Image: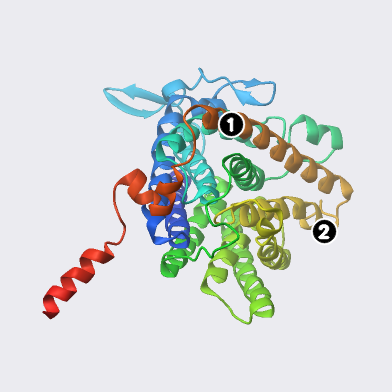
Amino acid sequence: MDTGNAAWMLTSAALVFLMTPGVAFFYGGMVRAKAVLNMLMLEAGAIAVTAIIWVLWGWSVAYAGHSIGGIFGDPATGFLLKDSMVAHNGVYTAADTTGGYPGSIDVAFQATFAMITVGLICGALAERIKYSTWMIFVALWVTFDYGPMAHMVWNGGLLSADGAISQALGAAAHDFAGGTVVHINAAMAALVIVLIIGRRKGFGTQPFRPHNVPFVMLGAFLLWFGWFGFNAGSAFGANGTAGYTWVSTSVAAAAAMLAWGFTERIRSGHYTAIGAASGMVAGLVAITPAADVVSPLWAMVIGAIAGIVTCLACGLKFRFGYDDSLDVVGVHGVGGLIGTLLVGFFGEGVGLLAGGDWRQLAVQAIIALVAILYSGVVTAIIAFALEKTIGWRVSEAQEIGGVDLADQGERAYDFATAASSILKEVK
């Protein structure tokens, strides 16, 4: 066992875990004050439910079980982690330590990916859904969507470098850290649920302003920090690939932040803090599938393209009338698609502009399309079933009064009490 690799992967798992609280603040700051606690709770629920499902059968469906049709693994093989954990002299330890690091560490690292992926979805559903429905959705989605998608791309399945699509086209599909599995997958799920549950009251007729912009910036910085584990950790060792992906991740995020800002400046005359935060995230999303195979120059180009295109794409929800509350589709869907496709242009030795030919672009486009279709169909079945049984939304009166009070029975900010106390002190 390489203790250096083991230490790095444990650190990376902790960094990726931090991304879900980061998303909680990023999303929480963008909603109105009457919905911030609900948003934080949706992220907490994503962590808690995913952790349980992952230990029960999620790990096995994604990575432990033998492949069933190249789509998902046998859920029994790694049920309750029996493939990776054993008791030795009364103490639980890894069943296998013959590799670079114990398999138990990989269980932890991959669990955090499942958490952040499902945690991205709720940003599109902000201010109108029930916490109870969300928790059931998380359990079902991680089981039937995320686990199989991770298996297909990262465990030798249909969409992997060794899968049937890659073999047919003679080019190895490349998704380094989750352009398809995480971002396209989550964004497509978000879009499907939004179309099923409908818009917030007042969408398109009244402004929905962020209630706490510093929260948004804090969340974005935490995401950037966590992304070093997300991308550099996906090298699965303390090595040169990890070091380079740290660099490519940073320059892509930086270029996207600047490109988004310049786009905003041209359109509105301002460089906004919300735009800076969103641009950072867009660049991080776009570099994710390509972080290990593009040069520093192309990493910056990918970031710049993502910053401009996602900035423009976020406005499409008003044109098409879908209420993606916090632009999950515009940032993660479009950003993930950009990054996945641009491997076909900029991937070293395989991309059209980097010594390769059309085949890499073709395989990247196909795996992105399959990811969209799979996520869309599976999510539609789950979301529609929940809508027709327990329902997704709080009542209209509860939505107007605030989902925090309706679902959590709490307020993030008790302005009335604070004002009353101040008046008493003045008197």
* Residue 50 in the image: above or below residue 329: above
Labelled disc at residue 25:
none
Q: Badge 1 is on which residue?
A: 384
Q: Number of callouts in the render?
A: 2
Q: Is disc 1 surrounded by few (<14), some (14 to 19) or many (20+) residues within 10 Å?
A: some
Answer yes or no: do the residues labelled 2 and 1 have beta carbons within 8 Å?
A: no
Query: In the rendered view, does 45 fall on the left or right side of 160?
Result: left
Q: Indicate the position of residue 151 as horizontal and vertical percent values.
A: 62, 31
- Front disc: 2 or 1: 1
Type of amino acid under label 1: Phe
Residue at 52% in and 30% down? 386
**183 or 11: which is nearer to us?**
183
Compared to residue 275, the image places residue 140 above or below, namely above
Q: Position of residue 228 (x, y in %)?
A: 52, 57
Furthest toward the bottom, the residue is 269
First reached walking from the N terminus: tag 2 or tag 1? 2
Residue in view at x 71 percent, y 51 percent:
337
| Crowd around label 2: few <14 · some 14–19 · many ≥20 (10 Å) | some
- Please give the residue where the numbered disc 2 appears in the rendered image: 354
Amino acid at pointer 2: Ala
Residue beneath the point at 47% across and 65% down: 210
The residue lying furthest to the top in this view is 76
328 lies left or right of 107:
right
Horizontal and vertical percent for residue 35?
41, 54
* Residue 390, position as x, y percentages in the image: 46, 29
The C terminus lies in quadrant = bottom left
The quarter holding residue 241 reads bottom right
- Dot 1: element: helix
> Nearest the camera: 195 or 370?
195
Can see residue 14?
no
Tell me, yes or no, if residue 190 can be seen here: yes
Mark 2 residue element:
loop
